Image (cartoon, rainbow, N blue to C red):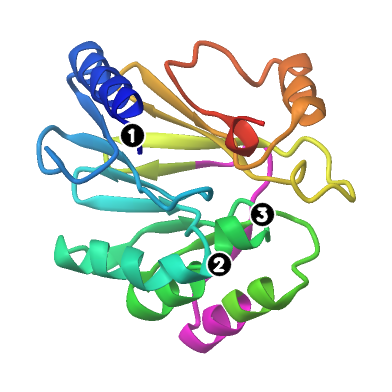
Amino acid sequence: MNTLFKKMTAVLMIAFMLLFSGCLITKTDESFADGDCAITFLDVGNADSSLIRCGDEYMLIDGGNNDDGDWISTFLMERGISTLKYVVATHPHEDHIGGLDDVIYNIDVQMLLIPQCEHEGQDAQSMMQTVNAKEVYTEYAQVGDKYTLGDGSFEIIGPVNITGNMNGNSIVLRYDYQGVSALFTGDAERKEEQAMLDRGLISDIDILKVGHHGS
């Protein structure tokens, strides 16, 4: 990571904390225990993994690449996180679910949310084999479904349409806590974003996890 990017990241983190003192957004575990709600974006390189804590409940959205599973599991366990209320596997691409088999094996997962699309390929099969072995309750995410996490809640707002485009099939969810909204988009692309906008599903978002790594 170059010096300029480090400085920009630090400024953004400080700005977020000043603007949303009730909901901390961090890249690492600094200030992880402060406040009632925290969003931590885990550094898994060109992949995705985000952890939301609200009160004493946790949700993990995606699990990085295959090589990230052990690191994420260790990250959680070192912070005393033995249970994840939810794990969201946004879509079955390796850079989003590659590490989830390790996480699900090592951490008690109460519910797994997956999109209503084919889960083919070695990474998806490995994840589902672990899910079955651990008897993890699994639900297909549907637009309009709502769930609670601590004193916050989240709603599934995508995918509007299931197609042959796996990125477009990504689960998109909006997390709300005390007037602050965070949108997690997986690898949703322009067409799916427009479909959600056309249906009025996206509005007043404070924090955006940019779709498809910003591409």
Which numbered mark, 1 or 2, is in the foreground of this view? 2
Position of residue 112 in the picture relative to residue 140 (left or right):
left
Tell which circle, 1 or 2, labels the residue nearer the N-terminal end. 2
Q: CA distance from mark 1 to mark 2?
A: 28 Å
User: Which residue occupies 48% across, 68% down?
Assistant: 99
Q: Name the residue carrying label 3.
A: 91
Quadrant in the picture for residue 188: top right
The residue most toward the right is 164
Image quarter of the C terminus: top right
Tell which circle, 3 or 1, labels the residue nearer the N-terminal end. 3
What numbered label is drawn on residue 152? 1
Q: Name the residue carrying label 2.
A: 98
Disc 1 crowd rating (10 Å Cα; few below 14, some 14-19, many 20+) is many
Check residue 183 for magenta coloring.
no
Q: CA distance from mark 3 to mark 1?
A: 24 Å
Q: Please, what is the three-letter code of the amino acid marked with disc 3?
A: His
Image location of residue 25, percent across then percent down: 28, 31
Which numbered mark, 2 or 3, is in the foreground of this view? 2
Kindly state the secondary structure of the residue where label 1 is placed. Answer: strand
Image quarter of the N terminus: top left
The segment highlighted magenta reads 128-146
Q: Tell which of 108 and 186 is nearer to you.
A: 186
Q: Tell which of 185 and 198 is nearer to you.
A: 185
Tell which circle, 2 or 3, labels the residue nearer the N-terminal end. 3
Position of residue 190 in the picture relative to residue 32 (left or right):
right
Q: Please, what is the three-letter code of the amino acid marked with disc 2?
A: Gly
Q: Tell which of 23 and 16 is nearer to you.
A: 16
Image location of residue 87, percent across then percent down: 46, 58
Q: Please, what is the three-letter code of the amino acid marked with disc 1?
A: Gly
Kindly state the secondary structure of the residue where label 3 is placed. Answer: loop
Q: Are marks 2 and 3 in contact (CB under 8 Å)?
A: no
